[in-house]
Structures are given as structure tokens and as C-alpha cells.
Image (spheres, helix red, strand yellow):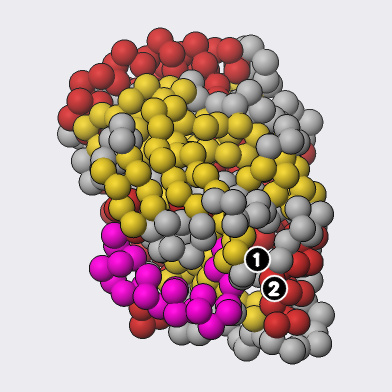
């Protein structure tokens, strides 16, 4: 069976996913077959495996760091929030239905055998498993029948490293308070503390580290700096949504930050390209006059379309389109661009709603979710993005609806199964394919089209996405080796502490 170690945190967004990915990379570099594991993830960013099953994108990112293929065994339970009090529940990659928070809390104990089977199957295949917790283990109102924090640590007999975020302030209180709210047998599982996102002079921090270790009887195994690594985030708390581009940019791209935005990582290949800014916009006053607008995926197309209408962003997007500037919709964003969205089976809100009427297509939600990896090529593309014509791509589909074109709307792509996807009209484009921008040739074709439309003779190019990711995972591992006691972590992994 695999050796195991678990990362828990004092709260959400303290860096659990990043630290888990870094340890996966370190163990891979050191020659161990390594896999991530998260019993239950709540996120709207998801991916489709080669088998057509759905799992959290954070675990896919950690698989990339570990150099292994994604499997739903690594994320057996995925919750995708549909509103403030309920979620779509996905078990072993398959949708089992929507549940309120109260109903799921009562139901989740039935998932323990499924989670244990997934973990044990992985543990028989790998040398090391790095488990990630969720939120905080000290949520005392949720500890009953816990399946993702100390409950999971007990099931896997895993030692725990507890991480806190100093950037928010109060990290000593957060770490100490979390430890003290745990039961004695749970406290004994914590073998080390980690302070994350530190900026400043560590010598000023050191007296506090000693006092914290003395108070908790747990060593501080690392003070990680605020790392400048470009790695996929979890969705709702990502700082990308609130970061303004620095410096002067030749091209400006705006992603509409929908309330229920999903798979915003589709647009990550456009980030950190010199001369190009990528902004997430949720208010009309912030839209400005971008060169291109992206409409991303959403967990609730109809509700977010109403939101666009109510905020006034729809009117601005249509004004942008009327000026001949491009709008590119992906998945739910593609559905919004059409003439109508119908929901006869109440997959979302039921009924029918008028679309933005920028593409001659109509969407009808069905009972079954489409989940598949797919590859293909762009067909003859018209308008500003004509350079996309015939370029290959690979990605995945994950959606409830089926979208039908009228005879006047040519498709955007031809798939490997000879079917077509998406639609185009003037400079409006739509597709169901997540990951369609992952190939740098596709990104560069879009950039060149925008530069040409502005009459700019400039060279702006994207890096090879896969190679770029590899350098970022190595940078993450190198930084963690420098600022954490990796020898001590190996002793914990071997059960020697």
C-alpha cells in the first residue's frame, strides 16, 4: 500500500491545493509514483477523464504536477453548487442528482464505502498518496460524519500537515485555534504546521514560530513565501478575478465574470502574455472597450443570462458586437449568445428565456449531461479570427443542453467523430469545447487576428502551454524545497514521527 500524507488548512483558500500539487511534484521528482486524492471537492471547475467521467479540475492540476493520468478515483465526490443552498452531486464521475445542503449532510455517510474503495484502489497502484482536505477541520457544526478532513485522515490513517494563510492576518490564532478545536486523537494526527503566503523579513516572524510550536506541541515545518507561480486555482476564491493587469498592453481581453462562472481556466492561456491583458469583469463600469469579450461557462445559464440583462452588461456586449468587435462564448456562454434557451425538464429553472440573439442557434436542455473528451479542427472560420481555419485542437465537453444551428449558421469546428460543434456569425463565435485555447497555435491565431483588426504590426506570442505548465510545477517544487523541511516530511511519510 502507498505511503500517505494529508494537507489540511485553517480555512478555504489558504493554499491546500497548491501545497498538495507541490508535494506531488517533489515526490515525482524523487522517483515516486504519486497521486493526489480529495474525497469531496466543491467546485464549478471540472474536467472530463478519458473514460468520460467528471472530476474536480484542481485534482487534474495536481495530476499534471505528479505526472500521472487523471482518474475519478482521485476525486470520488464532486459537488457543483447550483444555488446558495444546493448542489449537483457527482459520485465516481456520474451525476446522481441535485441535493439541498441539509439533504446532502444527511446522505453523505452513505458515501464512505465509495470513498474508501477509491482510496484503497489508488493506494494499491501508487507509491505515495497526497490527500487534500477541504475548508477547515475545525468546523465543529460539520464534524459529524466528516468524510473530507479528519474523518478522511482517520480512514486513511494519514498524518496531517496543517496550513495557515498569513496574508490574511491572524495566522497564529488561526493555527492555534484550529488545533485547539480538534479532539485529542485528531490533534495527534497533526505532525507539522505550515505558514503560507509570507511576505517580509522572516527573522521578525521567528519568535512567534517558536511560541506557536510550544503552545501546540507541533513543529512549524515551513514558512512558504507568496509564490509567483502560474498554476490553476480553485474557482470562487481565485485572486485572478480581482487582479488588474500591470503595465501598458497592446491588446485588452475581457472575460465576463458570471455569478456562477465555471471552468474559467479555459482562458488561462491568454494570461501572462507580454503585451496582452486579460481581465475578469463583473460590472458595466469596469468593461471599458476591450478588443475581445469572452463569455465563459456557467452552472446556471438561465440565471446568469438574467443577471447579464439586469446589470446592463448584456446591452454593452451587444453594443461591442454591433461595432464589429469579437465575442467568443464557451459552453454556457455559447448558449447565451443564441436566440433562446429552453428548459422543459427543469434542469435549471424551467421554461424558456430569450438569448442574446447574436448567433442563429437555439438551446434545449435535456435530462442527460454530455461528458466526453474530444478533438478535431476548426473549419473555415470567417471574420477577425479567420486565422483559426483548419487548426487542430483537443478538449472536452461537459454540458446539459443541446444547441442547434439554423441553416444560416456555419459550424465553428469539425470533431473527430465527423460531427460539428459551435457556430459563427460575423465576428461572434461559440463552442462547447473546454480547453479549445490550450494549443498555443490557437491562441496565437486569435492574437494575430486582433492585432490585424487594430492595424497593429506587432509580435505577441503565447508560450507552449504544456511546456509552460511544466516549468511552473518545477518552480513550485523548487520553492517548497527551499522553504520547507522536506527531510522531516519524508520522516512523517515513513511513519517515523
Residue 75 to residue 317: above or below: above
Q: Does residue 387 appear in the picture of this structure? A: yes
Q: Which residue does the image show at 45% across and 39% down from the upper left?
A: 401
Residue 408 to residue 368: above or below: below
Q: Is residue 170 left or right of residue 295?
A: left
**Range of magenta residues:** 306-328
The percent position of residue 407, horizontal first and vertical second, equals 59, 51
Q: Quadrant of residue 52?
A: top right
Report, in whole angstroms, how far the alpha carbon at label 2 lies from the one at label 1.
17 Å
The percent position of residue 265, horizontal first and vertical second, equals 56, 54
Please tell me whether the stretch drawn in magenta is mainly helix, strand or loop: helix
Which residue lies under the disc numbered 1? 270
Q: Which residue does the image show at 76% across and 74% down from the upper left?
A: 448
Q: Residues within 10 Å of mark 1 (few under 14, many from 20)?
A: many
Question: Foreground: 6 or 126?
Answer: 126
Q: Is residue 62 magenta?
A: no
Question: Foreground: 205 or 49?
Answer: 49
Residue 190 to residue 275: above or below: above
Question: SS at mark 1?
Answer: helix
The percent position of residue 497, horizontal first and vertical second, equals 53, 27
Q: Quadrant of residue 292?
A: bottom right
Q: Which residue does the image show at 46% across and 56% down from the upper left?
A: 338
Q: Is residue 324 magenta?
A: yes
Amino acid at each position: 500500500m502507498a505511503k500517505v500524507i494529508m494537507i489540511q488548512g485553517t480555512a478555504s483558500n489558504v493554499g491546500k491545493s497548491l501545497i498538495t500539487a507541490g508535494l506531488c511534484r517533489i515526490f515525482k521528482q524523487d522517483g515516486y509514483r504519486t497521486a493526489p486524492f480529495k474525497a469531496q471537492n466543491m467546485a464549478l471547475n471540472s474536467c472530463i477523464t478519458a473514460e468520460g467521467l467528471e472530476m474536480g479540475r484542481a485534482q487534474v492540476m495536481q495530476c499534471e504536477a505528479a505526472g500521472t493520468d487523471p482518474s475519478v478515483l482521485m476525486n470520488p465526490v464532486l459537488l457543483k453548487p447550483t444555488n446558495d443552498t444546493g448542489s449537483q452531486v457527482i459520485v465516481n464521475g456520474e451525476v446522481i442528482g441535485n441535493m439541498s445542503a441539509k439533504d446532502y449532510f444527511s446522505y453523505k455517510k452513505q458515501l464512505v464505502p465509495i470513498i474508501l474503495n477509491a482510496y484503497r484502489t489508488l493506494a494499491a497502484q501508487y507509491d505515495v498518496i497526497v490527500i487534500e482536505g477541504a475548508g477547515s477541520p475545525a468546523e465543529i457544526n460539520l464534524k459529524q460524519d466528516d468524510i473530507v478532513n479528519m474523518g478522511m485522515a482517520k480512514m486513511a490513517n494519514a498524518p496531517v500537515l496543517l496550513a495557515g494563510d498569513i496574508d490574511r492576518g491572524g495566522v497564529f490564532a488561526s493555527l492555534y485555534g484550529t488545533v485547539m478545536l480538534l479532539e485529542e486523537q485528531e490533534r495527534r494526527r497533526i505532525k507539522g504546521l505550515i505558514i503560507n503566503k509570507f511576505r517580509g523579513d522572516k527573522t521578525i516572524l521567528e519568535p512567534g514560530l517558536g511560541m506557536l510550536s510550544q503552545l501546540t506541541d507541533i513543529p512549524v515545518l515551513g514558512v512558504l513565501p507568496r509564490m509567483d507561480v502560474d498554476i490553476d486555482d480553485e474557482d470562487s476564491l481565485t485572486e485572478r478575478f480581482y487582479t488588474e493587469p500591470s503595465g501598458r498592453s497592446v491588446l485588452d481581453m475581457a472575460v465576463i465574470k458570471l455569478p456562477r462562472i465555471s471552468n474559467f481556466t479555459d482562458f488561462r492561456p491568454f494570461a501572462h502574455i507580454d503585451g496582452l491583458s486579460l481581465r475578469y469583469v463583473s460590472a458595466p463600469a469596469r468593461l471599458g472597450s476591450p478588443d475581445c469579450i469572452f463569455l465563459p461557462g456557467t452552472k446556471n445559464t438561465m440565471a446568469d443570462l438574467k443577471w447579464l440583462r439586469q446589470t446592463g452588461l448584456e446591452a454593452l456586449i451587444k453594443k461591442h458586437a454591433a461595432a464589429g468587435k469579437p465575442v467568443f462564448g464557451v459552453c454556457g456562454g455559447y448558449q447565451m449568445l443564441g436566440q433562446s434557451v429552453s428548459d422543459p425538464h427543469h434542469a435549471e429553472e424551467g421554461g424558456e428565456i430569450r438569448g442574446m440573439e447574436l448567433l442563429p442557434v437555439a438551446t434545449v436542455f435535456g435530462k442527460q449531461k454530455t461528458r466526453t473528451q474530444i478533438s478535431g479542427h476548426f473549419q473555415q472560420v470567417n471574420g477577425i479570427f479567420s486565422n483559426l481555419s483548419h487548426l487542430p485542437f483537443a478538449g472536452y465537453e461537459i454540458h446539459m443542453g443541446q444547441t442547434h444551428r439554423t441553416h444560416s449558421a456555419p459550424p465553428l469546428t469539425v470533431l473527430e467523430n465527423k460531427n460539428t460543434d459551435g457556430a459563427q456569425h460575423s465576428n461572434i463565435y461559440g463552442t462547447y469545447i473546454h480547453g479549445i485555447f490550450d494549443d498555443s497555435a490557437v491562441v496565437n491565431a486569435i492574437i494575430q487576428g486582433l492585432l490585424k483588426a487594430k492595424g497593429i504590426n506587432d509580435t505577441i506570442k503565447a508560450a507552449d502551454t504544456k511546456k509552460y505548465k511544466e516549468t511552473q510545477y518545477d518552480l513550485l517544487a523548487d520553492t517548497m524545497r527551499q522553504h520547507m523541511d522536506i527531510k522531516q516530511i519524508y520522516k512523517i511519510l515513513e511513519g517515523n514521527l
